[in-house]
Each structure stands twice: as C-alpha cells, then as structure tokens.
Amino acid sequence: MGVLDGKVAIITGAARGQGEAEARMYAREGAKVVLTDVLVAEGSKVAADIGPAARFIEHDVSSKDGWDKVIAATLEAFGRLDILINNAAISRPLKLEDTEPDVYDQIYRVNQLGVYLGMRAVLDPMRAVGGGCIINVASVAGFKGTSTLFAYAATKWAVRGMTKAGAMELARYKIRVNAILPGVIDTPILGTQSESMNEKLIKSAPLRRMGHVDEIAAGALYLASPAASFVTGTDFIIDGGMSL
C-alpha cells in the first residue's frame, strides 16, 4: 500500500530533474502520474520506464489550449485528478539591466503564467472529486534578495503570492495549495549558471552541499499525502539552511 494509492497527479517539467524524481516517487507510492514537458524524447522515456501508471504529454505550460488538452487526456486515461505539481521553470542568470523584455517575457510565461494557468485548469476536476492538492515549485530566490537572477526571482516571488492567495480562495473546495522552495539542487537548470555562482550559493548554505532531487520529491510526497491534510498556504523550504 502506497500513501498515494488511488490518486492521480499531473507533474509539469517532468522529463528530468525534480519533476522526474517526483513522478517516479509518486508512482512508487501508488499514484497514476501524467508527466508533461516540452522535452518529448526524455519525457516519453521516463513515462515508459515508470510503466502503465504513467503517461507523457507534450505540453507548453504557457498555453491555455495546452492545459485544456492535458486535463482532457488525464481524465480520459485515469478518470480523475487529485494532485498538480507546477514544477516547470526556466532560468537565465541575468541582472536587471541585462534582462531584455523578450527574455523577461519568456521567463514570465513559463514560470508565472504557466502556474496560473495550471491552477485554474485543475479547479473543475478537483472539485468534482471533492478536493485536491496543488504544489507550486517556487525557490529560495523567491524568499530573499538575489543578484543576477532578476526575472527568475520575480516570477518565484509571484508563485509564492499565487500560492497563498490560492490557499485562501480554494480552501472552501478542500483544495490545499502549498509552495516548495528549493535551494541549490543538482538539476540541469544549474547548467544555466556559472560554476563560480553555483559554488557561491552552495557555500551560503550551512549544510554546504547541493540538494538531491529525491529530497525535493520527498517534500512533494509529504504535501500530497494524508499526513499533510491540515497544511495549506505554506512555504515548504528545502534549502540546506540557505535562507537562514
């Protein structure tokens, strides 16, 4: 028996990194999982490796039509929806003065607009089953000041705001909304930053190491589980003490 037996989850950005780890852990705990990403080959491979409990759907999170298709495919495959993890994100290590409007818009559309569209898209199917769980992946960059991550940080602060507003609004439907705030995690997104920048960030954490994707997935498992039934609107910080 798994803690998510009978549950169905959509996980965006699940072709690799944190999203992949969350999908694999959820499936091991009994959930059916719908993985979405723009990385088709990688995402399809992960879903195939998980087996019959998984489906992969190519998905641009910044598209409302894309969300409509994901919801329809999820209900067709598994008949219900209980959990959404808004994990998909992109980053560019740029200061304000170096962030051109088109770059800012691209980051906003994935990291912020995509979260809004996802939260809105799951309302009807979650209400239909009497409640649900939304987990928005923010960042410690959305908790304290940062340098050279202007657009990324701005969107992650917004994700925290949407999480808290959503928790207030959706409690009446028994839909819990929480945010996970990872620190420096060993994922491909670190490749967008310089090695010296990553080393500086690691040294700023008391535990003096990068986190592992399974450590984030474990947090996402807890938030979706019955053990967190009284938890909503929270910032679940998993950062090795970086935000202290």
Image (spheres, rainbow, N blue to C red):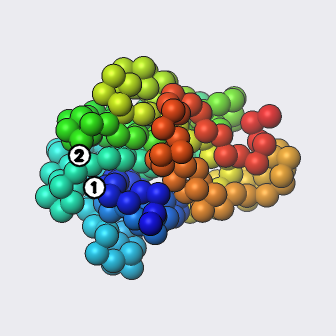
* Label 1 vs 2, first from the N-terminus: 1
Q: Nearer the viewer, residue 192 or 212?
A: 212
| Numbered disc total | 2
Instruction: Residue 200: give its label.
Output: none
Instruction: Residue 59: give its label.
Output: 1
Q: Is residue 11 above or below residue 32?
A: above
Q: Quadrant of residue 234?
A: top right
Amino acid under disc 1 = His
Image position of 184 (left or right of 171): right
In the rendered image, residue 19, in percent from the top left (x then y), is placed at 47, 58
Q: Quadrant of residue 174?
A: top left
Circle 2: element type: helix
Residue 103 seen in the figure: no
Per the image, the residue denoted by label 2 is 67
Q: How busy is the neighbourhood of tag 1: few (under 14 within 10 Å), some, or many (20 plus)?
A: many
Image position of 218 (left or right of 202): left
State yes or no: discs 1 and 2 in contact (Cβ < 8 Å). yes
Residue occupying the point 28% across, 67% down: 55
